Amino acid sequence: MKQKEKKIKDMVKDGYGKIAKTGTSCCGQSSCCGSSDFSMISTRIGYSDEDLKNVPEGANLGLGCGNPIALASLKKGEVVLDLGSGAGFDAFLASARVGKKGKVVGVDMTPEMLERARENAKKGGYGNVEFRLGEIESLPIEDNSVDVVISNCVINLSPDKQAVFKEAFRVIKPGGRLMVSDLVIKKALPAKIKESVEAYVGCLAGAIKKDTYIKHIKDAGFKEIEILYEKYYPVEGMANDPAVQDVLGDTDLKGADLKTIERSVLSIGVKGIKPL
């Protein structure tokens, strides 16, 4: 692994390890959306009140940027893989949709998150959910073994997104599907943001251009690729977030620069099919 990629992985692992321990989301006491209310964050990005009631307390850390569960149209008996499963929020929602004959596997590289997810699974009695320690660029999953791969605002954190999509393609059964929510950018972010550790953990600095993101999915072998939704991510609230001010405090960013960032970041939902 290249030194730069290792550095990125280490800082992401450390950042999310702290989140798992403290129970606060990526921007410290406030969320990336400028609120400490994880329920409010989640409903803004597509989860229902019913979704929020049906997961163990502590599973929702407000870390997502969309709702892959709503996109995936999961069916009873399916096997689902959640990339970057965190404390288990999406995995637990998927559990109810695939039923007792189905299975959900979550993969996360952060031991602290894994511990928290397993505790939540035990607390909620989820017999069809399993969490594995691993990196999404090298999945601890057998070839052609899952029906659906989901991910929520995680792939943008990887320094090697092409490897992630190739691995997703490898583990999905022929005819299976990729359904992910993620952050992408329309144009390059200011260099100071790209260099920021906190912004990387908060999903901004790792985002790549939308066309490049889609090309990676296509190059991995997926067909029938479709952007199911595309909307500006509400980063305008970040300007008043104390933790984000720490990120921006040593930069020369002005109001116009923040406006540029606001109109540069998109939340998208993407679907792809592995050919038969």
Image (cartoon, rainbow, N blue to C red):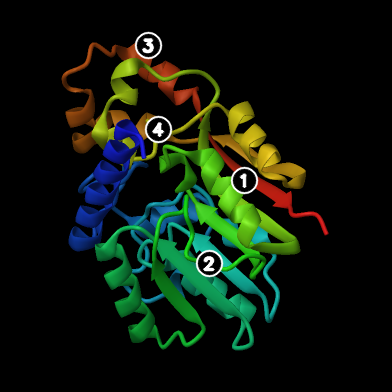
User: Could you tell whether 187 is left or right of 13 in the image?
Assistant: right
Residue named by callout 3? 256
Q: Are marks 1 and 3 in contact (CB under 8 Å)?
A: no
Residue at (28% x, 70% y) in the render: 116
Q: Of all residues shown, which one is farthest toward the right?
A: 276
Q: Which quarter of the figure is the C terminus placed in?
A: bottom right
- Dot 1 amino acid type: Gly
Going from N to C along the chain, the mark reached first, 1 or 2, is: 2
Q: Nearer the viewer, mark 1 or mark 3?
A: 1
Residue named by callout 2? 141
For this rendering, which residue is in front, 251 or 45? Answer: 251
Q: Nearer the viewer, mark 1 or mark 4?
A: 1
Q: Are marks 3 and 4 in contact (CB under 8 Å)?
A: no
User: CA–CA distance between discs 2 and 4?
Assistant: 35 Å
Q: Nearer the viewer, mark 2 or mark 3?
A: 2
Label 4 crowd (10 A; few <14 / some 14-19 / many >=20): some
Residue at (49% x, 22% y) in the render: 263
Q: Which mark is residue 269?
A: 1
Q: Residue 13: x and y, percent?
A: 28, 50
Can you say whether 192 is above or below 236 in the image? above
Label 3 crowd (10 A; few <14 / some 14-19 / many >=20): few
- Dot 4 amino acid type: Val
Residue at (72% x, 47% y) in the render: 222
Going from N to C along the chain, the mark reached first, 1 or 3, is: 3
